[in-house]
Image: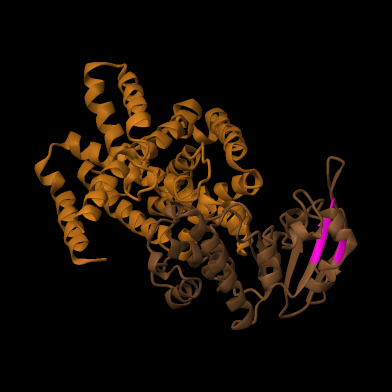
Chain colours: A orange, B brown
């Protein structure tokens, strides 16, 4: 890491820390949501953009994380802090089980099977009234005292999301990540250099699920509730859009995509309930003009200019 | 080192490989030749595990390897390049070779150490030996076809193989690039002592570098021996319809 990036990071970090002091509560809440969804979209991109796996139903792991956290508070006498450990573990376990079934298939077939299995999990959560609260979900979740306020939840989310993003950044740039990108570009070739491709994909999937589980527990902290829509397939689609929107070959692309989506929904949503129409048009323009996403486009222009100057 | 006996493989009733025999000794450079569709690439895919044979045995260092998955066979010391360029197009040239080196050094599940500086010398040494060191930071998808074929070979070298299998290493190359590749193969065999098995349509290239030649036709091995023996073999001359003087000029 060079000095410029370090200074940028510190400045951005301080700016984020000051937010609750200067901005109204609504924006603090919105920023928390961006951090949660940004972490979630980045975890999806770990397998989608860097592993080339068609992870079509990533929201399942997010929802399960939120429920795992909520259920520890609602159905046990354990400290709610335990929920933050349970969320990634339960999500990773589900990722392992689903992964063992799905990684045998490749590309679209992998994605389709994942949607089927994910919908099954959704149906169970949706119907199991005694345990999960069914279609009502769980509300008034027990949040640990120091982080129960809007700004408390914000700082907690900021810290946890920051740690998750750093960990995921390390993973993408580790030997594991490098080989994962090799599998994305060319699975047969990677197998031919001695990599057990299926096992590598399975580990990637479990890691992504664990980070999604963390994001789920953060959402439950910010929102104070967990409900079945969190693991509905339409959210998975939104996550894929976030990755494409921001740029799925760049590490920070999905985070930017999440910010754009949340901003669109909030600000266009004020004027019309058909904000998805605006999203649809944005998506079409994106596919035609910025196929590598907003960040991918900016990077290319910037890097292109730097190369010319040289 | 490698012994292939009576190998068979069919696709929907079409016998792609129908009785192939091949012996490769340590340190040898062996060429497989034959007309298009003779089953050369299928034979290589059977040896390196991309396909499983219907019948027959493949022994490497006295162990049966037929039917094993590709990553297992690679770990035993056989690595290969592909006929159609088969690289990691979005990664840089350096990263392409590094993937193989990381895999070979069992770093695949190292999660939190930066890969950038890992095994850098070893990777650069391989790039240097094939003449791609000056292009190390280029995105591999933007290289010329000839350079991509050389990169193919460099990736295969990343696994420190004992047996290197090259599927038409000079296909689509200009005469100059072919000459460079020929030199490279002679260097790998002579200086580095690698055993090389390759198939090739360029007969000048085959007779310049191979110490032994196996000829396939319609999936069958029809001849195997030194270049002189093969050159004089009537069956081989027949297989190449034009006759000896056209093929082996």
Of A144 and B135, nearer the camera is B135
Q: In the rendering, at what x and y percent does residue A119 appear? A: 56, 31
Compared with residue A303, is residue A110 higher up or lower down, i.e. above or below?
above
Res. A196 in view: no
Q: In the rendering, at what x and y percent does residue A243 appear? A: 38, 40
B180 with respect to A84 (left or right): right
- The magenta stretch spans which residues? B214-223
Prevailing secondary structure of the magenta residues:
strand
B209 with respect to A25 (left or right): right
Return the residue found at the far left: A22
Q: In the rendering, at what x and y percent does residue B74 appear? A: 67, 67
- Residue at 41% across, 49% down: A214
- Residue at 43% across, 77% down: B121
Q: In the rendering, at what x and y percent does residue B227 appear? A: 78, 72
Let me know if residue B93 is in the magenta part: no
Q: Quadrant of the N terminus of chain B?
A: bottom right
Find residue A200 and report its image quarter: bottom right
B137 with respect to A28 (left or right): right
Find residue A193 and report its image quarter: bottom right
B74 with respect to B152 (left or right): right
Res. B141 in view: yes
């Amino acid at each position: 890491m060079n000095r410029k990036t370090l200074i940028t990071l510190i400045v951005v970090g301080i700016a984020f820390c000051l937010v609750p002091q200067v901005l109204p509560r609504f924006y603090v809440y919105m920023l928390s949501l961006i951090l949660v969804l940004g972490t979630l979209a980045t975890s999806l991109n770990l397998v989608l953009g860097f592993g080339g796996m068609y992870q079509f139903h990533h929201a399942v792991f997010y929802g399960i994380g939120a429920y795992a956290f909520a259920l520890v508070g609602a159905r046990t006498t354990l400290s709610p802090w335990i929920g933050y450990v349970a969320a990634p573990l339960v999500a990773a376990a589900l990722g392992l089980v689903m992964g063992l079934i799905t990684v045998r298939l490749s590309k679209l077939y992998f994605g389709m099977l994942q949607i089927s299995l994910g919908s099954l999990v959704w149906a169970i959560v949706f119907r199991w009234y005694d345990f999960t609260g069914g279609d009502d979900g769980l509300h008034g979740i027990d949040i640990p005292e120091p982080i129960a306020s809007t700004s408390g939840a914000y700082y907690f989310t900021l810290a946890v999301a920051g740690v998750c993003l750093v960990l995921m950044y390390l993973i993408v740039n580790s030997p594991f990540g490098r080989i994962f990108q090799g599998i994305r570009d060319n699975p047969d070739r990677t197998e031919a250099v001695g990599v057990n491709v299926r096992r590598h994909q399975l580990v990637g999937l479990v890691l992504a699920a664990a980070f999604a589980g963390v994001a789920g527990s953060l959402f439950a902290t910010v929102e104070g509730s967990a409900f079945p829509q969190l693991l509905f397939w339409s959210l998975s689609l939104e996550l894929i859009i976030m990755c494409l929107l921001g740029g799925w070959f760049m590490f920070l692309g999905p985070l930017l995509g999440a910010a754009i989506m949340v901003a669109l929904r909030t600000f266009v949503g004020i004027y019309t309930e058909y904000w998805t129409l605006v999203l649809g048009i944005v998506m079409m323009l994106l596919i035609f003009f910025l196929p590598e996403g907003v960040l991918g486009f900016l990077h290319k222009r910037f890097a292109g200019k730097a190369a010319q100057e040289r | 080192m490698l012994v292939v006996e009576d190998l068979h493989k069919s696709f929907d009733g079409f016998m792609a490989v129908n009785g192939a025999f091949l012996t490769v000794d340590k340190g040898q450079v062996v060429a497989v030749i034959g007309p298009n569709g003779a089953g050369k690439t299928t034979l290589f895919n059977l040896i390196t595990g991309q396909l499983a044979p219907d019948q027959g045995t493949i022994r490497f260092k006295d162990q049966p390897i037929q039917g094993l998955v590709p990553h297992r066979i690679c770990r035993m010391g056989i690595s290969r390049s592909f006929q159609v360029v088969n690289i990691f197009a979005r990664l840089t040239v350096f990263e392409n070779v590094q993937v193989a080196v990381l895999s070979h050094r069992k770093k695949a599940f190292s999660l939190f150490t930066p890969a950038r500086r890992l095994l850098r010398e070893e990777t650069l040494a391989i790039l240097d030996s094939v003449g791609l060191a000056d292009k190390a930071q280029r995105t591999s998808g933007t290289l010329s076809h000839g350079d991509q074929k050389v990169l193919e070979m460099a990736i295969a070298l990343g696994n420190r193989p004992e047996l290197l299998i090259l599927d038409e290493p000079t296909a689509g190359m200009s005469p100059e690039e072919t000459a460079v590749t020929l030199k490279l193969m002679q260097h790998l065999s002579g200086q580095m002592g690698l055993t090389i098995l390759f198939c090739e349509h360029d007969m000048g290239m085959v007779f310049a570098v191979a110490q032994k030649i196996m000829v396939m036709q319609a999936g069958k091995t029809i001849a195997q021996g030194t270049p002189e023996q093969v050159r004089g073999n009537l069956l081989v001359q027949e297989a190449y319809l034009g006759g000896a003087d056209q093929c082996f000029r």
